Image: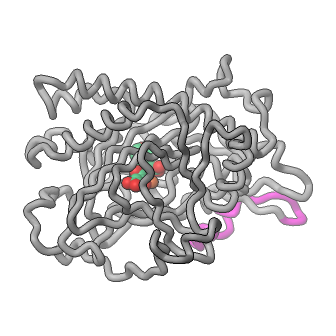
């Protein structure tokens, strides 16, 4: 079973972290100019947003119907916002502060914690940059495991207080992720008895996670820049805290790009590729992207949650039957991250299988480069 570092050693990402001093740029350089910001964006002021099926559902976790509402949101949107989730606002403020403080450091200081091409954690441009011809107007910092070594490089004197906040955030979000997992599974009719790897307390104690701190500096030409290019997360689910600047958009079939408006104290939850697989495609992972702002800097913190690295994820038996064949083969998170690192938005089609009257076969074997699936 490869470890995450082995996965990335096999698929190094060569992004040129040449210019990470966004403040020095008065104009959008050619290398950051995206030509096809094509779209039919649905924004808040648009009348269309008033129709409830055109805005991302907001769900109160204290609502006795929360599981049902979440199920409907996952099926139709692949994303929802939660309120009354029990995470103290002070902790959300603290983790945002860690991100803001980190990204405000001088460029040469941030470069001391640069993510290496075959590494997992550290500072740099988005990992997905290598799949696009143009650069993204953002910088990120990925934390997998302890942030201690990198934080010591960034803040030799007072790294401890930043580490403490990250550790507390990890611990708290892990509990919330476990709770959301059960609500989403429950909405599919899957109970605690049906998931063997959820641990003795059935709290997904062994689940794995990454924290991604993102910064989208103000941009001289936001209409032609891209903060974070369209992608799905490879996770079970991702919990996102955004500051009060909008920018996150999700793609809704038949509608186009829909902005997810920041809600004070709210958290955005999106379905990732592994839940897509587990649900046999019933809850689709959502394609999302981030646009940037002319005057205001946007910050976000993503908690990317998945299974323990040795657990094989496949469509749940309760969701499979003679009329619903399994659409995906088993895959561990690490194996899937390797596929994602190689094939990016086509990764799901590489684990897809197909039912025929002769049985099942691996779609990948017959249509290797067709990029089937949804992309
Ligand atoms: C566990 C992980 C998920 C992630 C890759 C990573 O190893 C750590 C960073 C995560 C992230 C955050 C930004 C978007 C994304 C697609 C990326 O390039 O890095 C996700 C990855 C993912 O979900 O596949
Ligand atoms: O910044 C955002 O709103 C989204 C970030 C994101 O998609 C990610 O980190 O995976
Ligand atoms: Fe994402």
Q: Position of residue 335 (x, y in %)?
A: 54, 44
Residue at 61 percent of width and 48 percent of height: 59
User: In which quadrant of the rendered view does residue 186 lie?
Assistant: top right
**Quadrant housing the C terminus:** bottom right
Question: Relative to 24, is 340 on the left or the right?
Answer: right
Does residue 58 belong to the magenta stretch? Answer: no
Point out residue 40 in the picture as x, y percentages from the top left corner: 48, 80
Residue 369 on the magenta span = yes
- 206 above or below 180? above
Q: How is the image coloured?
A: one colour
Q: Position of residue 159 (x, y in %)?
A: 19, 25
The foreground one among 144 and 50 is 50
Residue 10 can be seen in this image: no
Residue 133 relative to residue 371: left or right: left
- Ligand 3: which quarter? bottom left
Span shown in magenta: 356-375
């Amino acid at each position: 079973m490869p470890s995450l570092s082995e996965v990335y050693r096999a698929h190094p990402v060569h992004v040129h972290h040449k210019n990470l001093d966004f403040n020095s740029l008065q104009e959008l350089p050619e290398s950051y100019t995206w030509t096809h910001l094509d779209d039919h964006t649905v924004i808040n002021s648009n009348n269309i947003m008033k129709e409830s099926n055109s805005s991302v559902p907001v769900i109160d976790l204290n609502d006795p119907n929360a599981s049902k509402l979440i199920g409907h949101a996952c099926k139709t949107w692949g994303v929802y916002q939660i309120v009354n989730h029990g995470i103290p606002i002070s902790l959300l403020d603290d983790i945002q502060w860690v991100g803001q403080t980190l990204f405000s450091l001088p460029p040469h200081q941030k470069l001391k914690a640069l993510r290496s091409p075959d590494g997992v954690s550290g500072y740099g441009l988005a990992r997905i940059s290598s799949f696009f011809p143009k650069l993204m107007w953002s910088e990120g910092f990925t934390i997998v495991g302890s942030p201690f070594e990198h934080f010591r490089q960034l803040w030799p004197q007072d790294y401890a207080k930043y580490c403490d906040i990250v550790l507390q955030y990890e611990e708290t979000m892990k509990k919330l992720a476990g709770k959301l997992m059960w609500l989403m599974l429950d909405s599919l009719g899957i109970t605690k008895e049906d998931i063997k790897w959820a641990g003795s307390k059935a709290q997904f104690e062994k689940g794995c996670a990454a924290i991604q701190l993102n910064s989208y500096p103000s941009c001289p030409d936001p209409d032609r820049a891209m903060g974070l290019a369209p992608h799905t997360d490879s996770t079970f689910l991702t919990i996102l805290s955004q500051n009060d600047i909008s920018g996150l958009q999700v793609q809704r079939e038949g509608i186009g790009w829909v902005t997810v408006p920041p809600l004070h104290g709210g958290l955005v939850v999106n379905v990732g590729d592994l839940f897509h697989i587990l649900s046999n495609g019933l809850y689709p992972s959502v394609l999302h992207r981030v646009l940037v702002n002319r005057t205001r800097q946007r910050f976000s913190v993503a908690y990317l949650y998945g299974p323990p690295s040795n657990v094989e994820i496949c469509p749940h038996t309760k969701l499979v039957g003679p009329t619903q064949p399994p659409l995906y083969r088993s895959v561990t998170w690490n194996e899937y991250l390797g596929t994602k690192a190689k094939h990016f938005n086509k990764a799901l089609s590489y684990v897809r299988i197909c039912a025929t009257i002769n049985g099942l076969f691996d779609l990948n074997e017959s249509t290797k480069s067709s990029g089937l699936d949804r992309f």
